[in-house]
Image (cartoon, rainbow, N blue to C red):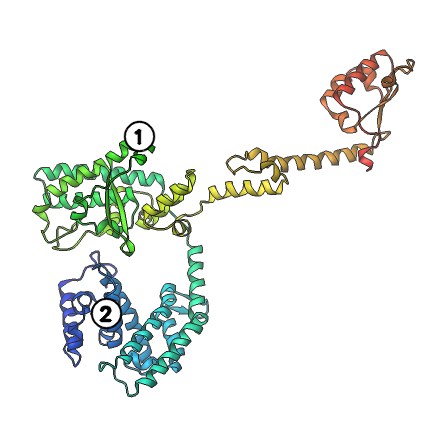
């Protein structure tokens, strides 16, 4: 399909081509087989008309495999996934035809074809021998699982002895398929999967982890809210009602997605009956008493709706009072513009059973709101943004688990895939931890969290170490210029009864350079030499002993 086309839906001509291709495939000798498939009515009509689709639809094994996938799911949206899976196998089959000459996929399920499967997978996934990288790493990664499932489906058909597959000896075919599957299980990882996984992880690492900024989210929210109010006012009047109805639906869809940070499918597939029929649950009084007054007000202001999410799990959606008022206007005008057969709340006015595309809606509104980077406004990035910002809040383990359940995944998934480490946050927290450990004062902070440790305490060690090294260098240089290793302050020894006065006081050389020592020894007689005499000397010596306690007789510089 042309990349420049803004509307990616099939045109009328393409619908005719798809119908003609489906008719040609389903009117052959296996017409009864195709008539029994759900694929004929659900998947084949949406497949593109080309050689890839023709090869996939014409292979019985591929169609049987796709039919088994389709029957596992109830939601109609799975048909797009099935179509993509069939086209992947169709591309693989066309490549195997060129390499081996086999026309159907069953003929390739032999052990000697293992290397052909490896080469064909590298071709369709865009493998580069020089850089040892894939253009489509995910395709190469899951192709091994798909081929093992194809082997299981072929085994099932051969055991049932179906007449749809051409084979001569079923037992021989079963042994060959079993051996080929063994090769896939034991050697596919060394050939394809390991390299594809490394390539995928490297691409994620090299790709910058960008998220929408909070200022852009606020700007987007204000713009969409303003557009919703204008569309509501115009819808109540007579100015372009249908266009305003669609704009109001798109704005409500965007506001709901922005508030709940859900997956796009969980919002755009919401049905009217699920929104209207809100079952009232029996709430325990203990829970209401545990809430604060503001929290009790919020429970009355927000409407909680449960819908089906990923994996058919119940997913809650919250609707504020403002959004509820907009939806009430939407429902009041719904019968005028939307078919009664359309069950979706955010229905497409131009169709009978379709819904609005949440991806294209968010993209269009983001471009119109003139945010700094429109490519960042996707449901996945919005979910990652709220999961990352949540790290700043000091929430408990139970609150974290409850929030993860509201988002529709487990705590492990939330922490592994959605929470991203911010550079500033990581640098600040981890550097504090490293400084604390390297300071050798871990016992001092025993039982404390990183929030309790002051950053000045952690940096203190480095600054003190530098000061001590600098002082030690100055002391060693000054000690070489001193006339003696100790400075002895002589007192008046005439009074032999005073033992404390009879002992000389030793002052560490570092004290000579302190401001306290210079303040005491301002007398010219004190600065004339290192020995002080007279009655004034006794007063100064007493002051010095109070400022600088006596050191051991051993000089610390000579240890």
Q: Quadrant of the N terminus?
A: bottom left
In the rendered view, tell whether residue 474 sits above or below residue 346. above
Count every numbered label the image shows and give the total. Answer: 2
How dense is the environment of label 1, judged by Cα within 10 Å: few (below 14), some, or many (20 and up)?
few
Query: Which residue, as the protein is rendered here, is positioned at the far top?
Result: 535
Q: Is residue 247 above or below residue 34?
A: above
Residue 49 percent coordinates (x, y): 20, 70
Q: Is residue 157 left or right of residue 195?
A: left
Rendered residue at 28%/81% (across/down): 103
Image spot of residue 286 (x, y percent): 32, 35
In three-dimensional space, the C-alpha distance between marks 1 and 2, rounded to whole angstroms, equals: 52 Å
Kind of element beneath mark 2: helix
Q: Is residue 540 visible?
A: yes
Number of the label disc, if any, that sits on residue 364? none
Residue 389 visible here:
no
Residue nearer the viewer, 55 or 446: 446
Quadrant position of the C terminus in the picture: top right
Q: Residue furthest bottom?
A: 168
Q: Is residue 440 left or right of residue 178?
A: right
Q: Position of residue 410 (x, y in %)?
A: 37, 50
Q: Where, by quadrant of the figure, is residue 137 drawn?
A: bottom left
Image quarter for residue 7?
A: bottom left
Q: Residue at x 77, y 25 (%)?
A: 512
The residue that appears at 42% across and 56% down in the rendered structure is 204
Q: Secondary structure at mark 1?
A: helix
Judging by the rendered image, the residue that carries numbered circle 1 is 294
Q: Which mark is residue 67?
A: 2
Pick whichever, 302 or 237, lies toward us: 302
x and y percentages locating residue 330 in the rendered image: 14, 42
């Amino acid at each position: 399909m042309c990349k420049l086309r803004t509307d990616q839906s099939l045109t009328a001509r393409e619908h005719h081509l798809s119908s003609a291709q489906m008719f040609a495939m389903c009117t052959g000798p296996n017409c009864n087989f195709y008539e029994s498939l759900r694929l004929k009515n659900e998947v084949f009509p949406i497949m593109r008309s080309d050689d890839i689709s023709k090869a996939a639809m014409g292979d019985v094994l591929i169609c049987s495999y796709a039919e088994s996938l389709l029957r596992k799911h109830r939601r109609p949206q799975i048909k797009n996934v099935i179509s993509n899976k069939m086209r992947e196998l169709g591309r693989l089959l066309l490549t195997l035809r060129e390499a081996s000459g086999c026309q159907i996929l069953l003929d390739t399920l032999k052990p000697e074809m293992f290397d052909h499967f490896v080469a064909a997978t590298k071709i369709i996934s865009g493998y580069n021998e020089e850089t040892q990288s894939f253009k489509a790493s995910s395709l190469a990664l899951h192709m091994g699982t798909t081929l093992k499932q194809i082997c299981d489906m072929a085994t099932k058909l051969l055991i049932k002895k179906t007449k749809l597959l051409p084979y001569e000896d079923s037992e021989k075919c079963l042994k060959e398929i079993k051996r080929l599957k063994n090769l896939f299980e034991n050697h596919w990882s060394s050939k394809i999967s390991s390299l594809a996984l490394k390539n995928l992880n490297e691409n994620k690492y090299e790709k910058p982890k960008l998220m929408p900024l909070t200022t852009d989210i606020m700007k987007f929210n204000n713009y969409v809210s303003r557009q919703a109010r204008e569309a509501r006012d115009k819808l109540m009047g007579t100015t372009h009602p249908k266009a305003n109805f669609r704009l109001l639906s798109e704005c409500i869809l965007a506001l709901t997605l922005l508030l709940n940070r859900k997956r796009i499918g969980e919002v755009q597939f919401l049905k009217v009956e699920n929104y209207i029929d809100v079952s009232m649950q029996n709430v325990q009084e203990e829970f209401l008493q545990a809430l604060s007054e503001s929290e009790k007000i919020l429970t009355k202001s927000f409407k909680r709706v449960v819908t089906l999410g990923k994996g058919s799990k119940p997913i809650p959606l919250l609707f504020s009072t403002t959004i509820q008022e907009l939806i009430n206007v939407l429902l009041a005008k719904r019968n005028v513009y939307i078919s009664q057969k359309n069950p979706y709340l955010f229905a497409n006015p131009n169709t009978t059973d379709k819904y609005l595309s949440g991806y294209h809606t968010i993209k269009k509104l983001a471009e119109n709101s003139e945010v700094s980077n429109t490519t960042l406004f996707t449901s996945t990035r919005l979910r990652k943004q709220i999961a990352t910002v949540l790290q700043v809040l000091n929430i408990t383990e139970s609150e974290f688990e409850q929030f993860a359940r509201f988002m529709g995944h487990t705590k492990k998934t939330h922490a592994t895939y959605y929470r991203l480490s911010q550079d500033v946050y990581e640098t600040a927290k981890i550097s504090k931890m490293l400084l604390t450990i390297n300071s050798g004062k871990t016992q001092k902070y025993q039982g404390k969290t990183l929030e309790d440790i002051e950053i000045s305490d952690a940096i203190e060690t480095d600054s003190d170490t530098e000061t001590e090294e600098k002082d030690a260098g100055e002391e060693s240089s000054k000690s070489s210029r001193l006339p003696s290793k100790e400075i002895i302050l002589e007192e008046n020894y005439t009074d032999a009864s005073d033992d404390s006065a009879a002992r000389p006081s030793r002052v560490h050389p570092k004290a000579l350079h302190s401001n306290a020592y210079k303040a005491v020894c301002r007398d010219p007689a004190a600065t004339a030499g290192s020995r002080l005499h007279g009655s004034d000397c006794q007063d100064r010596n007493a002051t010095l002993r109070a400022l600088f306690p006596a050191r051991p007789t051993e000089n610390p510089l000579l240890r």
